[in-house]
Structures are given as C-alpha cells and as structure tokens.
Image (spheres, rainbow, N blue to C red):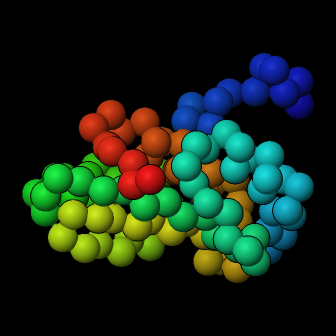
Amino acid sequence: MLPYSHMPHLHEQHCIPCEGGIPALQKPETLKLAAEVNNWALSADNKSISREFSFDDFKQALIFINKVGEIAENENHHPDIHWWWNKVELILTTHAIDGLSNNDFILASKINRISDISVME
C-alpha cells in the first residue's frame, strides 16, 4: 500500500462495484474522508453524506443534475437526488452495505469538480 502522501486524490480514483459483504466505513474513517470533500455533511448516523446546491433557475439546476448523472453513470454509483425549482440536494450512501463506502466520497469529490455550481450556504 502506498503511503498516504502518495495516494491518489479522491477525484482521481474510481468507484469499485459493491454488492455487500464488506463492512461500512466507521466514524473515524468517514470523518477523515469527509474533510476531503468540502461542503458535504455527514449524517448523524454515519450512513450518508449530503450537500445542497442552489441555482439561478430551473434550467441551471437541470443542467447540473444531468452532469451529476453522467458522472454517476461513469462511476456506476448513484446519488439520491431531490430537486426543487432552483435547488438540488444530493445524498450519497452505499445501499448494499447500509452505510458509507469509499465510493460515496469518490463520487462527492467528482461532483465537487463540476465547475459551474454555486453552493447553497
């Protein structure tokens, strides 16, 4: 295993298919990974991360959702998406293990790199 300083950034990694049989990440691991994905909130039960995004209008929100969908399809890991007129909430969890895996943080990092998003503060 490579030393941490040589590990690829989350956005450079790829999701690994998960069909269960592995344990969900524990709180110390999720806290460390959450620190690497700005603006994503860790749920109180340590089973998901979420982030809200706001836009000027419906069309921009839809464009963003389509970009998220493309990333999710490429990684074969999909967020729960809640969409209002100009707001989108994404929730990431690994359903097969009823908790968080590295995949959730990899996808969050890739979503963070979408250049034309404005964060709801």
Q: Where is residue 94 in the image (x, y as percent from the top left)?
A: 63, 70
Q: Which quadrant of the figure contains the N terminus?
A: top right
Number of numbered tags placed on the structure image: 0
100 on left or right of 31: left
Q: Residue furthest front?
A: 121
Q: In this view, does 16 lie above or below 25?
A: above
Q: In this view, does 24 lie above or below 8?
A: below
108 on left or right of 87: right
Quadrant position of residue 27? bottom right
Q: Where is residue 20 in the image (x, y as percent from the top left)?
A: 72, 74
Q: Residue furthest top?
A: 6
Pick the residue in front: 3 or 65: 65
Q: Is residue 48 visible?
A: yes
Quadrant position of residue 58? bottom left
Q: Where is residue 89 in the image (x, y as percent from the top left)?
A: 40, 67
Q: Is residue 18 visible?
A: no
Q: Position of residue 110 (x, y in %)?
A: 48, 42
44 on left or right of 37: right
Quadrant position of residue 3? top right
Pick the residue in front: 109 or 1: 109
* Picture residue at 79% right of the left edge, 53% below the top: 31
* Picture residue at 79% right of the left edge, 74% below the top: 21
* Picture residue at 44% right of the left edge, 53% below the top: 121
Q: In this view, does 26 lie above or below 14?
A: below
